[in-house]
Image (tube, coloured by chain):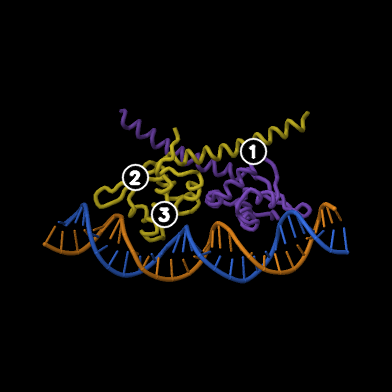
Chain colours: A purple, B yellow, C blue, D orange
Amino acid sequence: MSKPELGDPGPVEVFAALGDPTRLSLLTKLSDGQTRSIATLSADTKLTRQAVTKHLHVLERAGLVASIRVGRESQFGYRPEPVAEARSYLDRVSAQWDEALARLKALVER
Amino acid sequence: MSKPELGDPGPVEVFAALGDPTRLSLLTKLSDGQTRSIATLSADTKLTRQAVTKHLHVLERAGLVASIRVGRESQFGYRPEPVAEARSYLDRVSAQWDEALARLKALVER
DNA sequence: GAAAAAGGCAACCAAAAGGTTGCCTTTTGT
DNA sequence: ACAAAAGGCAACCTTTTGGTTGCCTTTTTC
């Protein structure tokens, strides 16, 4: 299921994947390190199995989860790298803002 | 403390707003602390002014930017709070993952 | 070996997203 | 005073998204 893709998707794709309540909750659940099947993940939701499947594929395309077929079920697991990427992107945005503030403060104070 | 304030929606809305290349680049530009008009922001893009306007409104609804009409133009400026929120959300996801790893390591090592 | 469980695949659908064009109002520069 | 600049508003169009249902295949369980 997890095909060898060249190059991680960028922050935009990651943010887009996170920008849906169902997907964000799926990812948050999976970030506890436990692997789960589609049936399990569909259990505590109002959506159909197929809807959940689609969301899982979106997360997978964004690199946020990976799946392997084990027996009759597909096990999905969390992948930390894209979250780290997204974090560092936001860190840079924050840093740029902070620098701007610092420069402004310096300018005002002299 | 954290009351559900207007113009400061949850992480899902923030991620959704960040999940578009045009919007992410607009926000990154604005995070330098400088305020910009729609005309200015539309200048270095292939999109029409109206398209950019729509994106700015999405960012505004997510609380990521704020605007005031000054004279004949609308000045848009960066708002840091939602980015901080999004960062801390990702931090928590990361932390949960790290704890899971630590527990696994502890289990294996004894 | 049949029934049940898990899930893939495809068609289909409605609503939302992203973008455009046209036109009207307000502000500014000369 | 008036043309140009900035931008709001609204209609419209196309593609994507989020969801559904139906059906078929592969495992597992009894």
Q: How far is mark 3 from mark 2, CA to CA?
A: 16 Å
Of residues C2 and A3, which is closer to you in this image?
Answer: C2
The disc label shown at residue B108, or none: none
Residue bearing mark 3: B55
Whichever of callouts 3 and 2 sits on the residue coming sooner in the sequence is 2
Q: Dot 1 falls on which chain?
A: B
Host chain of mark 3 = B
Q: Are marks 3 and 2 on the same chain?
A: yes
Q: Dots 2 and 1: beta carbons under 8 Å?
A: no
Relative horizontal placement of residue A6, taking residue A71 as reference (left or right): left
Tell us which disc is closer to us: 2 or 1: 1
Q: Secondary structure at mark 2?
A: loop
Residue holding disc 1:
B97
Front in this rendered view, residue C1 or B8: C1
Count neighbours of disc 2 (C-alpha within 10 A) and say few if under 14, some if 14 to 19, many if 20 or more: some
Residues marked 3 and 1 touching at CB (< 8 Å): no
* Mark 2 to mark 1 CA distance (whole Å): 38 Å
The answer to whether D24 is drawn above or below residue A107 in the figure is below
Name which residue type carries label 2: Thr
Q: Residue at x 59, y 46 (%)?
A: A25
Instruction: Relative to A63, say whether D3 is above or below.
Output: below
Q: Position of residue B22 (x, y in %)?
A: 45, 54
How many neighbours does mark 3 have within 10 angstroms: few (below 14), some (14-19), or many (20 or more)? some
Q: Which residue is mark 2?
A: B35
Chain letter of disc 2 in the image = B
> Which residue does the image show at 60% across and 43% down from the upper left?
A28
Sequence-first tag of 2 and 1: 2
Question: At label 1, which amino acid type do we have?
Answer: Trp
The x, y position of residue C30, in whole percent, is 16, 57
Quarter-wise, where is residue A47 in the image?
Answer: bottom right
Could you say which quadrant of the image residue A86 lies in? top right
